[in-house]
Image (cartoon, rainbow, N blue to C red):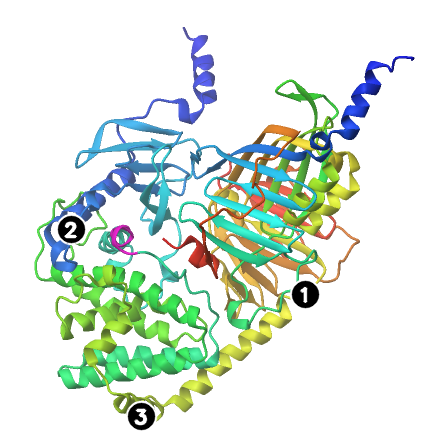
């Protein structure tokens, strides 16, 4: 019998091994925040994503979204409490017009974004990256995002975009990513965000990606922990 | 040697300000400010326990003072952020003094300044509640009580010291009270403005009344008006209003009580000549009376909701001190509002409350109040609809890079809506050091404290809409000695950045002094 080449064994293994095909996406990032002359302690965020669920763990708070159950659990680990809410609809419900009593106080900048791709090559921890700079300009605020984007991405970027990214950015910023497929399909290993707020001093975030891989998720990472107490509102969840 | 002298001068010029060693002789204005802080601590050493039993720790609260030229003075902070350098051989009652000149420019440093303040959490590795004072070159005339303030008391340090007491008390509050509801953000309706006016009148009448039964009757009116006002507010808005009073009202009460005590006699740590603006609280009764003037003026303003909390809260606290001496003990710890304590002190039956409500209409001539306040509220709403919805090419003048709030000279009526100030006939002028903004008669908005917005409705996606003259261009968008002219305004400034995108032109002012 003719021997199969080595690569074929590998392909067969990949095909039949449920673990490697079912492996989830695993992303760990570290973030610091500088404001008013002070830089915060680095904070780590661990994300697991599979087809039916997302788990975002920041230490004190864990957010689990279960698409199979149509539920979100926000878990406050220190007080062993959780809040269950229905998964948000894809498109946010239109907001009713504010009462006259409330108008003019809060300011939500609506940025017009421009994106520039650097021609020179960059690296982050030895990994080749493309540097993109996004400039956002609003009436009373500006924001600059510098992203060091790798295209060597082991995770399912389409799923990452749908489940995480697209629901956490504005429509205007989404449009910039959609205009630049290279930006949308890559993963930022490092991001530096500088926000000049309308009134508050400059705010600067620095994000580094520590882990970007396919891996087997720990048991129960998408499950509600045992022995936690349900609450009805966010105020109750975080009450001291 | 002669040859090297110009080179040495050049090198000195090129040395960044922050890297230069600190001159141990501080500018006079800073030395005076340090003395005022020491005086504030001295007053509290003498009177804190009388003003508010249990108040301590005030000497451990750092002060940060920002000056119009960008210089910052930090006193008593264990962890100064980058940029601060210790001033050798200088302290305030043993507390270290630091100076940050990283962002200092050449603006003149002669006062008197106008001081405003608040609390921020501040520090490089240890973040502490810090009194954050802005010494501005603003105009005293902007003050609500300017007309009533004797000229010798305008910009008097006595007022600044009372403000320091106010802010220090906020830090103390933070150690014994859990903040629960957030600030009230509320544009008054006619209903709100009318009942707020009645509340203010009732509190003033109670304060001026000499017999206890009259005081109690007017306080019952206050509670009745408040109940009727709250009917048209959400529960949260009511809680926010009451909590604002609890925090700001008691801090204003601290100022009033301190002035009362200083009026009875005062031995200062300062010598005549230490601070030319200090009146040694010789006119302390004025500062008490000023609170009553503020109470009157605020209640007459139809369009202002939040400022009421300072003075309505202060007078509730002053009246509680008469009706229930010692009421402060465990007040914050219990978490009750001032109005709740008054309610329990009066112990009104539902029938008595009903009677008080029924009498408001005639006792306070409410029909006239309704006519007066509704006119203002309706004009504001109409102006908002006309101005805020204008479309076209938007011009934004941004004062934030120079850290100066816009203090415009409005042309005609100006209506507040949240943080917006809507001027249908526009802004006449803003003048600040070498900056001059002159507006024409066209609707303009001051917004978010630092910005002026004007919309050129004749331009949409086409047309530049402005001309720009300048002395020098730096990079692609920065101009020095610039004059930017639109159909709505002309701006002259020492240094600007122009960001020109399709529908918006943003002009950020980068310097207020010509180099």
Please provide the residue range marked out in magenta.
Answer: B171-177
Question: Neighbour class for label 3 at 10 Å: few (<14), some, many (≥20)?
Answer: few
Residue drawn at (14%, 73%) of the image = B322
Residue occupied by mark 1: B390
Between circles 2 and 3, the one closer to the viewer is: 3
Q: Is residue B403 depicted above or below B146 in this figure?
A: above
Same chain assignment for discs 2 and 1: yes
- In terms of image quadrants, where is residue A104? bottom right
Left or right: where B427 falls relative to B267: right
Tell me the CA gap for discs 3 and 1. 45 Å
**First-in-chain label (3 vs 1):** 3
Q: Secondary structure at mark 2?
A: helix
**First-in-chain label (2 vs 3):** 2
Please identify the quadrant where the N terminus of chain B is shown.
top left
Q: Is residue B173 magenta?
A: yes
Question: Neighbour class for label 2 at 10 Å: few (<14), some, many (≥20)?
Answer: many
Which label is found at residue B44? Answer: 2
Q: Is residue B335 magenta?
A: no
Q: Secondary structure at mark 1?
A: loop
Q: Is residue A179 depicted above or below B308 in this figure?
A: above
Q: Provide residue A213's location: percent of width, then percent of height.
A: 65, 29
Between circles 3 and 1, the one closer to the viewer is: 3
Q: Secondary structure at mark 3?
A: helix
The dominant secondary structure in magenta is helix
Which label is found at residue B359? Answer: 3
Check the image and name the residue furthest to the front: A1
**First-in-chain label (2 vs 1):** 2
Tell me the CA gap for discs 2 and 1. 53 Å
Which label is found at residue B289? Answer: none
Q: Provide residue B73's location: percent of width, then percent of height.
A: 32, 37
- In terms of image quadrants, where is residue B475? top right
Between circles 2 and 1, the one closer to the viewer is: 2
């Amino acid at each position: 019998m003719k021997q199969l080449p080595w690569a074929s064994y590998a392909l067969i293994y990949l095909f039949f091994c449920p673990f490697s095909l079912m492996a989830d996406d695993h992303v760990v990032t570290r973030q610091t925040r500088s404001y008013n002359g002070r830089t915060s302690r680095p904070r780590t965020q661990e994300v697991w994503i599979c087809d039916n669920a997302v788990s975002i763990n920041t230490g004190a708070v864990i957010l689990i979204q279960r698409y199979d159950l149509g539920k979100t659990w926000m878990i406050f680990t220190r007080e062993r409490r959780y809040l269950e809410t229905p998964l948000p609809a894809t498109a946010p419900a239109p907001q009713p017009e504010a009462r006259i009593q409330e108008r003019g106080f809060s300011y939500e900048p609506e940025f017009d974004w421009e994106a520039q791709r650097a021609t020179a090559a960059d690296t982050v921890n030895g990994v080749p990256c493309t540097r993109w700079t996004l400039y956002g300009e609003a009436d009373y605020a500006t924001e600059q995002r510098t992203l060091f984007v790798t295209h060597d991405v082991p995770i399912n970027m389409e799923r990452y975009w749908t489940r995480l990214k697209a629901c956490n950015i504005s429509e205007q910023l989404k449009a910039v990513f959609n205009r630049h497929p290279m930006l949308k399909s890559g993963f930022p290993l490092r991001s530096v965000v500088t926000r000049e707020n309308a009134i508050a001093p400059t705010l600067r975030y620095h994000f580094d990606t520590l882990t970007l891989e396919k891996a087997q998720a720990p048991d129960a990472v998408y499950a509600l922990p045992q022995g936690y107490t349900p609450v009805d509102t966010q105020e109750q969840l975080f009450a001291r | 040697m002669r040859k090297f002298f110009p080179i040495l001068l050049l090198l000195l010029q090129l040395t960044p300000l922050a890297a230069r060693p600190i001159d141990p002789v501080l500018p006079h204005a800073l030395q005076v400010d340090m003395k005022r802080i020491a005086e504030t601590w001295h007053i509290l050493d003498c009177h804190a326990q009388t003003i508010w039993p249990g108040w301590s720790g005030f000497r451990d609260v750092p002060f940060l003072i920002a000056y119009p030229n960008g210089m910052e003075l930090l006193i008593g902070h264990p962890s100064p952020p980058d940029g601060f350098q210790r001033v050798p051989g200088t302290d305030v009652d043993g507390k270290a003094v630091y100076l940050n000149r990283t962002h200092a420019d050449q603006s003149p440093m002669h006062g008197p300044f106008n001081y405003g303040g608040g609390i921020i959490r501040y520090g490089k590795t240890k973040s502490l509640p810090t009194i954050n004072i802005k010494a501005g070159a603003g105009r005293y005339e902007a003050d609500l009580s300017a007309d009533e303030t004797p000229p010798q008391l305008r910009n008097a340090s006595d007022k600044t010291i009372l403000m320091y007491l106010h802010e220090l008390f906020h830090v103390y509050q933070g150690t014994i009270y859990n903040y629960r509801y957030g600030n009230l953000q509320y544009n008054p309706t006619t209903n709100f403005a009318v009942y707020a006016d009645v509340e203010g009148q009732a509190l003033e009448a109670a304060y001026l009344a000499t017999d206890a039964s009259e005081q109690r009757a007017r306080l019952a009116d206050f509670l009745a008006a408040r109940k009727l006002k709250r009917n048209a507010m959400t529960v949260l808005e009511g809680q926010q209003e009451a909590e604002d009073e609890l925090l700001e009202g008691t801090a204003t009460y601290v100022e009033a009580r301190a002035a009362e005590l200083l009026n009875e006699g005062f031995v200062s740590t300062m010598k005549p000549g230490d601070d030319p603006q200090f009146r040694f609280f010789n006119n302390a009764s004025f500062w008490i009376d000023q609170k009553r003037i503020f109470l009157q003026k605020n209640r007459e303003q139809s369009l202002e909701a939040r400022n009421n909390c300072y003075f309505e809260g202060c007078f509730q606290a002053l009246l509680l001190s008469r009706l229930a001496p010692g009421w402060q003990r465990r007040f914050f710890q219990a978490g009750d509002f001032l109005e709740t304590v008054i309610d329990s002190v009066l112990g009104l039956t539902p029938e008595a409350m009903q009677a008080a409500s029924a009498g408001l209409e005639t006792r306070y001539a409410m029909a006239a109040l309704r006519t007066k306040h509704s006119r203002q509220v309706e004009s504001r709403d109409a102006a908002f609809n006309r101005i805020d919805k204008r479309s076209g090419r938007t011009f934004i003048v941004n004062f934030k890079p120079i850290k100066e709030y816009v203090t415009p000279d409005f042309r005609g009526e100006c209506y507040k809506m949240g943080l917006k100030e809507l001027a249908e006939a526009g802004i006449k002028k803003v003048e600040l050091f070498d900056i001059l903004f002159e507006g024409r008669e066209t609707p303009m908005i001051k917004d978010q404290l630092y910005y002026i917005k004007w919309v050129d409705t004749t331009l949409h996606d086409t047309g530049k809409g402005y001309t720009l003259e300048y002395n020098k261009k730096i990079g692609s968008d920065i101009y020095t000695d610039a004059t930017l002219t639109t159909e709505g305004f002309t701006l002259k400034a020492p240094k600007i950045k122009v960001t020109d995108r399709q529908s918006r032109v943003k002009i950020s002012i980068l310097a207020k002094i010509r180099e």
